[in-house]
Image (spheres, coloured by chain):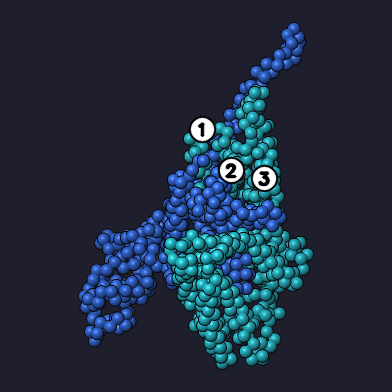
Amino acid sequence: MQAWTLVVFLLATMAVAYHLGRKRAIVRAGGASRIKDLHSLPAYYGLYAALWAGLPALLLMGLWVGLQDQILITLVTASLPPEMLEGLSDGRVGLLINDIKNLATGNIVSMDVTPAIQVAAEQYTRLRGIFQWAMWLAVAAVAIGGLSFAWASTEPRMRARNRVEGAVKVMMIVFSSIAILTTLGIVLSVVFESLRFFDQVSPLEFFFGTRWSPQIALRADQVGASGAFGAIPLFTGTLMVSVIAMLVAVPIGLLSAIYLSEYAARRVRALAKPVIEVLAGIPTVVYGFFAALTVAPFIRSLGASLGLDVASESALAAGLVMGIMIIPFVSSLSDDVINAVPQSLRDGSYALGATQSETIRRVILPAALPGIVGGVLLAVSRAIGETMIVVMAAGLAANLTANPLDSVTTVTVQIVTLLTGDQEFDSAKTLAAFALGLTLFLVTLSLNVIALTVVRKYREQYE
Amino acid sequence: MNSEAGEGARPRRTIDVVNASLKRRYAKERRFRRLGATAVALGLAFVVLLFADIILKGYTAFQQTYIQIPVSFPAEAIDPEGTRDPEVIGDANYMAFIREGLRGLFPEVTQRRDKRQLKGLISVGAAQLVRERVLADPSLIGSTQALWILADDDIDMLVKGHIDRHAPEGARRVSDQVIGWVDRLEAQGRVAKRFNTIFFTHGTSREPELAGIAGALMGSFYTLLLTLILSFPIGVGAAIYLEEFAPKNRWTDLIEVNINNLAAVPSIVFGLLGLAVFIGFFGVPRSTPLVAALVLTLMTLPTVIISSRAALKSVPPSIREAALGVGASPLQTQLHHVLPLAMPGMLTGTILGMAQALGETAPLLMIGMIAFIVDIPGGFTDSATVLPVQIFLWADSPERGFVERTSAAIIVLLAFLFVMNLAAVLLRRRFERRW
């Protein structure tokens, strides 16, 4: 790949620039014995030169690589005969462009290759070649230009260290802002696509409709595939799986945190706590496999022996395993808050003659309650956003049911299914995934904000 | 009670009330304690159950069944002109030679239907393996060799005892006749289980016996490498700025709140971001380690930043004051004095972030890492899949052989995670400093 060779070239240029800048500073100062005349250490002049050689060139390259594709597509689309694009939806045009690109790179093409497409593909290849070379030249020119500028401006009185430090500081500010940019990116990407979805489907239907069947009819006369986007069954399904998970995780997590922090001997605690926390480090796909191949068949056969009719992909199996996954989450958060309760409260309670369990139930838990609630809310937000377990162990059928032995589907399962099948962009089906994503993001975000505020308030209370 | 009250001579003392309730209270205390112990035991039991289940399901996949068949390589069929040209040698029909040898072991099989079953004993990929062998060693041409030939996955399962021989014939994947043949071969010592090298050297395949994790491992390697290159400097830079330089104002407060919230955003949302922004807007090629690493970088950054800040916080202010006192600039103080002392903590956090990235699946499904890719990727822009996604794909396959291989792939994944976490713990122990 030419891009990678270019990166290597830039790194090499920066290394050369460092040495040149350093040497130059010493020479300008009048030899190694006169270094004290320099404002900064020689290395800073080297770094100054390296930054001038590397940073502008890297920025230009990043911009170029990021925008090249868009510009190429615009150029190629503009060169297509207009009658080809007539009456095509945006999505179709996207497919056509995709085919042209595939043809150009020698991949499999989905439609018949007409001469016009052939020409477009050749044009695409040609333009891309030109762009690549232009990028090489431009970036190399900027790098050399930067280096010469640094070379020319190197003199003993130049404050190299201050300038380098200024650049480093700006870089650090940019790095810290990436967190903001990420949030902004998430919000913008899901909001824009969701708005387009709500153009086609009314929000009222989406949030309050009870039928979910995202297949859109390909032909107008097709039977039974009208597409219904009522997300209530998904919400109830998510809710049911999360509730089952919390029913498993909260009692076990909370009680084991209490036991380990209040009762257990030091050695038991030192051993049991990390072992339980192993559960937090296991990838979710492993839990999914465990749920689908071990727990679900077990529950099914157990149900059969009790005369119950259990779906092979029951909400119960997914919820149980998700609960196991969340146990360490609840237990370590509760452990933190229980340990934060001041010892004086315990001592006071014991002095009044309370037993240990009475102290825990009447004094420690009420004192730790806000923190525990915050932890549980965080755990709920995790359960709602958990994907792999439900993708592998819960079903696809959007049943509106309250029976945990039935198969249900969740928001995350639908996002995955809608986006991993054969996609057509701009169809309501694909956009629905983003609307679901927006809902998921907003719900988990508000849960997190509430939980974090509660936990922080609680910590401040005892610090 | 009433009789006591009736006596009425002695006033009831508090200590009596307490003593009367003591038994009940102690019983309650014991119950509560047992409840806690049960919860801990349950938690531990889940850990054991999970690991036992995976290991029991998966350990057999590290061995693979081979059948010894005398295969002759007639020179006139492989290389009639004796040129030893690899292209000519490679074109020969090796499956025919293997089948010939197999028929030699079972001369009584003449029916067409039975012959087809006999062919089913060996893997469809066996010919390719034999071909590679002959290409590597052309002196085999013209000789007859007793070769260990890769068995079909059904035979593999039968030999490993995963197929119930007592089930009715229609309900299992191998017929009575085939079981008889395999038993006969076993009696002759022609069936052996050997270490499953294919599992570690091949890409994925539709055939369980030919499927390996090499492609997924390389995909994970490239993805993690790039994630590390991106997230470590960015995370550390952001942490230093936020912890040491940032003025306390609205903007930095916003960044703080943001980072904490991002750490709790569902991973699948990052997949949506990757799909819409990186693939949709910037045109990064889908299903490559490049786009996966970009998404995972954004996902792990909060972890890296939070742990790096904690590491910076643990360096005492006296270090900073001493450095500033001898005339170092604020940035020199950070880079020359504080950073080296905080580095072990930062590395620990980064390793944990990488472990999180290695096990992540959901966002990668969104950005096309679930394509069926047989080739082993050789760079950041080759189509690839990663280990957890490979596990997800195999878990969906109905063949019994894939259950075993999925579990084995999970064992490999867990082993990597274990090593990374162990490294983090050791690093922390080795360099942890109490000031």
Task: Give left or right: position of B399 versus A358.
Answer: left
- The structure residue drawn at horizontal position 72% and vertical position 71%, both measured from the top left corner, is A196
Residue at image point 60% right, 37% down: A339
Viewer-proximal residue among B36 and B64:
B36
Alpha carbon separation for disc pair 1 and 2: 17 Å
**Mark 1 packing: few (<14 Cα in 10 Å), some, or many (20+)?**
few
As shown in the figure, which amino acid type bears the numbered disc 2? Answer: Ser
> Which chain comes out blue in the rendered image?
B
Q: In the rendered structure, are the residues bearing label 2 and label 3 in contact, judged by CB atoms less than 8 Å apart? A: no
Q: Secondary structure at mark 1?
A: loop
Q: CA distance from mark 3 to mark 1?
A: 28 Å
Badge 3 or badge 1: first in the primary sequence? 1
In the rendered image, what is the letter of the chain coloured cyan? A
B271 over B58 or under it: above or below: below
In this orientation, which residue lies closer to the viewer: B101 or B81?
A: B81
Q: Earlier in the sequence, mark 2 or mark 3?
A: 2
Tags 2 and 3 on a common chain: yes
Q: Is residue A451 above or below residue A141?
A: above
Chain hosting mark 2: A
What is the quadrant of residue B183 in the picture? bottom left
Q: Position of residue A265 (x, y in %)?
A: 51, 32
Give me the residue at 25% from left, 77% from top: B138
- Please state which of residues A109 and B21 is positioned toward the viewer in this rendering: A109
Q: Residue A265's mark?
A: 1
Relative height, residue B391 to residue B281 (above, below): above
Q: Which residue is mark 3?
A: A455
Front position among marks 3 and 1: 3
- Numbered disc 3: what chain? A
Mark 2 residue crowding within 10 angstroms, few (<14) / some (14–19) / many (20+): many
Disc on res. A331:
2
- Image quarter where the C terminus of chain A lies is top right
